[in-house]
Image (tube, rainbow, N blue to C red):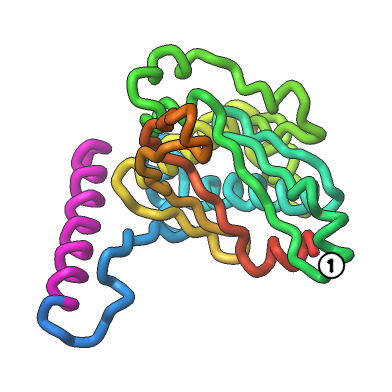
């Protein structure tokens, strides 16, 4: 079975699930959670998509996801800012100290790289301009998650880690598979670490009525930290 056939089957399966979900609500079986909500690609499905995309074994794809989320979690716990090459940056809220003093939860923020935002068409009409832009966070981050770091992380506690070349392919596959899911209106959920989704914001007029400046509609990538990540940074 070639790669294109596998991708078509994957899309077909998710389309069927989405249709069944809507039908279930229409016929009143009480599964309201499926109504009006996107399906979520879980970690196992992301790993499968990565393996298919890059010709990797599922074990190597899993090592890559674990290396990305593990390194990011450890760095965020220290208060560092992290950039995942070609994907985006993570940081804890600047209000972390105030939040801790007030007994509130520290939040984790995600900012997509220009190329990743272009792949998701978050800013229509600007895709070609943004696609070739470098990610500023990669120059200022305390930790950059790239092929070299992933290869190093996968060697910890193991006799066999990924080569830097394989880690690079796996990282690209992680970015591509996540973008493909989000473009298809699916959330991407990595248990314990967090979930990515697309939030669609409609056009709105500014608060100052004298200026009457209307902001255009746009899509945004939203990240919600999972239980384990939230516990680590709080």
- Image side of residue 104 versus residue 69, left or right: right
86 or 61: nearer the viewer: 86
67 or 105: nearer the viewer: 105
Question: Which quarter shows the N terminus?
Answer: top left
- Image side of residue 34 versus residue 197, left or right: left
> Which residue is most to the bottom?
29
Q: Residue 215: x and y, percent?
A: 43, 32
Magenta span includes 10: yes
- Image side of residue 8 versus residue 133, left or right: left
Q: Report crowding for label 1: few under 14, some 14 to 19, many 20 or more residues within 10 A (C-alpha).
A: few
| Vertical comparison of 9 with 193: above or below | above
Q: Residue 198: x and y, percent?
A: 41, 47
Residue appearing at x 19%, y 44% in the figure:
8
Q: Which residues are magenta?
A: 1-25
Considering the whole magenta stretch, tell me its main secondary structure. helix
Residue appearing at x 70%, y 30% in the figure:
148
Magenta span includes 209: no
Residue 120 visible somewhere in the drawing: yes
Q: Quadrant of residue 40?
A: bottom left
Q: Total label count?
A: 1
17 or 198: nearer the viewer: 198
Residue appearing at x 55%, y 65% in the figure:
191
> Which residue is most to the front?
210
11 or 197: nearer the viewer: 197
Q: Secondary structure at mark 1?
A: loop
- Image side of residue 129 versus residue 193, left or right: left
Q: Residue 160: x and y, percent?
A: 68, 45
The residue under label 1 is 102
Q: Residue 116: x and y, percent?
A: 48, 30
Residue 55 visible somewhere in the drawing: no
Question: Which quarter shows the C terminus?
Answer: bottom right
Residue appearing at x 44%, y 60% in the figure:
42
């Amino acid at each position: 079975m070639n790669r294109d056939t596998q991708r078509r089957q994957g899309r077909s399966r998710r389309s069927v699930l989405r249709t069944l979900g809507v039908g279930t609500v229409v016929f009143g079986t009480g599964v309201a959670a499926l109504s009006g909500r996107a399906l979520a690609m879980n970690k196992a499905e992301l790993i499968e998509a990565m393996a298919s995309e890059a010709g990797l074994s599922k074990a190597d794809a899993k090592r890559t996801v674990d290396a990305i989320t593990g390194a990011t979690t450890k760095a965020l716990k220290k208060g560092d800012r992290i950039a995942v090459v070609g994907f985006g940056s993570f940081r804890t809220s600047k209000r972390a100290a105030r939040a801790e003093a007030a007994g509130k939860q520290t939040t984790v923020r995600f900012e997509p790289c220009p190329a990743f935002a272009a792949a998701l068409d978050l800013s229509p009409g600007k895709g070609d301009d943004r696609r070739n832009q470098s990610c500023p966070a990669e120059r200022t981050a305390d930790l950059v998650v790239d092929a070299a770091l992933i290869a190093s992380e996968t060697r910890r506690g193991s006799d066999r880690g990924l080569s830097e070349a394989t880690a690079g392919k796996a990282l690209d596959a992680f970015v591509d598979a996540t973008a493909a899911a989000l473009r298809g209106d699916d959330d991407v959920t990595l248990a314990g670490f967090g979930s990515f989704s697309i939030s669609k914001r409609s056009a709105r007029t500014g608060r100052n009525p004298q200026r009457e400046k209307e902001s255009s509609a746009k899509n945004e990538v939203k990240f919600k930290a999972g239980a384990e990540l939230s516990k680590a940074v709080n």
